[in-house]
Image (tube, rainbow, N blue to C red):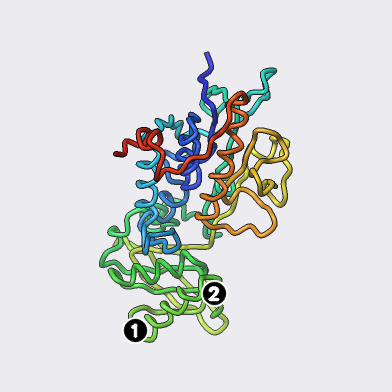
Amino acid sequence: MNEKTDVIIIGAGPVGLFAIFELGLLNISCHVIDNLDKPGGQCAELYPDKPIYDIPSRISITGQELTNDLIAQAKPFKPVYHLNQQVQKITKLETNEWLVETSINKKIQSKCLVIAGGAGSFVPRKIPLQNIDHLEGKNIFYSIRDKSKFKGGKLLIAGGGDSALDWTNELSKIADVTLIHRRKEFKAAPDSVSKMLKLEKEKKIIFSIGQIQNIEELKNEKIKVIVKNDKEAKNYEVDFLLPFFGLKMELGPIADWGLNLDKNLIKVDTEKFETSEPSIFAIGDINIYPGKLKLILSGFHEAALMAQECFKYCFPDKKNVFRYTTSSKDLHKKLNST
């Protein structure tokens, strides 16, 4: 027998987790599918310890703290999580419901689908060198889950985007950090760049221009990274190399679902955030529309409007009476509030 629910959310990142809450307020039950081994998406996987500054009412919150809060917020609505699996196939049934099949042969039936999978499955862009795979997870790390691992170590960070600059600034508090980038210009937020340059001026970090040419494993459990620029080659003997060359997106099976795509992003309307296929919605970084901002808070807004439209599919014979969580006793009861 297939499992049944009102809505299947594909993606357990921050936007997917908040969608559970918004749908739950409307008595809409949810199952959530994610290919990672835990909820949280990029926040939990790539920067759990990294501060986020643009979540309303939170001056600063880490990716893991945000994830934990969203899971707790969704908990009263008893979502069912299906982790470590990917949606492989969707089928429209004669009842106009959807049958979803996952990579481990799980079958779930729902009235609506909500795609909240970031911009697909993200994979770090790796160093284009051969025979270094055995150093990954030992000396080379493409993401940071526990920054305490690097405390007191000698680090070489490579890259010029937000992750490289943010981790340079953060890890300089606990480690000996050198940042390398192929040029003086950066793609990171101006504030992060200013902080990094201030640290360099104060000699709390080293910044050097160059690109990684080779990596050698040393007998003392360190590695030697050869970095070359137009003028010279330098050798860096370090405990850890942290390359942050960005992420490449793998849209995966979503590309074969017949949705209206624009450069691997899903087109939606801005009233309901519905795709070209009725009862399939896309929220968060996976969607595209005029004026789109790839911010978590934008995804929260999209989740709220999506939920209102899902109600019509889930309860076609009922009228949706909009209620505020501040004043509705029924909602207070659901949220275990007094």
Mark 1 residue type: Lys
Up-down relation of residue 272 to residue 167 (above or below): above
Mark 2 residue type: Phe
Q: Which residue is mark 2?
A: 186
Position of the C terminus, as image quadrant, is top left
Up-down relation of residue 310 to residue 271 (above or below): above
Q: Outermost residue toward the left?
A: 152
Q: Which residue is mark 1?
A: 203
Up-down relation of residue 111 to residue 71 (above or below): above
Q: Quadrant of residue 56?
A: bottom left
Q: Position of residue 64 (x, y in %)?
A: 36, 51
The residue drawn where x is 45% and y is 78% is: 234
Please name which of the two marks, 2 or 1, marks the residue nearer to the observer.
2
Mark 1 surroundings within 10 Å by alpha-carbon count, few (fewer than 14), some (14 through 19), many (20 or more): few
Asked if the residue at tag 1 contacts the one at tag 2, i.e. Cβ–Cβ closer than 8 Å, the answer is: no
Asked which secondary structure carries label 2, the reply is: loop
In terms of depth relative to the viewer, which is nearer, 157 or 291?
291
Q: Position of residue 255 (x, y in %)?
A: 68, 40
Mark 2 surroundings within 10 Å by alpha-carbon count, few (fewer than 14), some (14 through 19), many (20 or more): some
| Residue 119 seen from this side | yes
Q: CA distance from mark 2 to mark 1?
A: 20 Å
Q: Quadrant of residue 111?
A: top right
Relative placement, left or right, of 205 versus 116 is: left
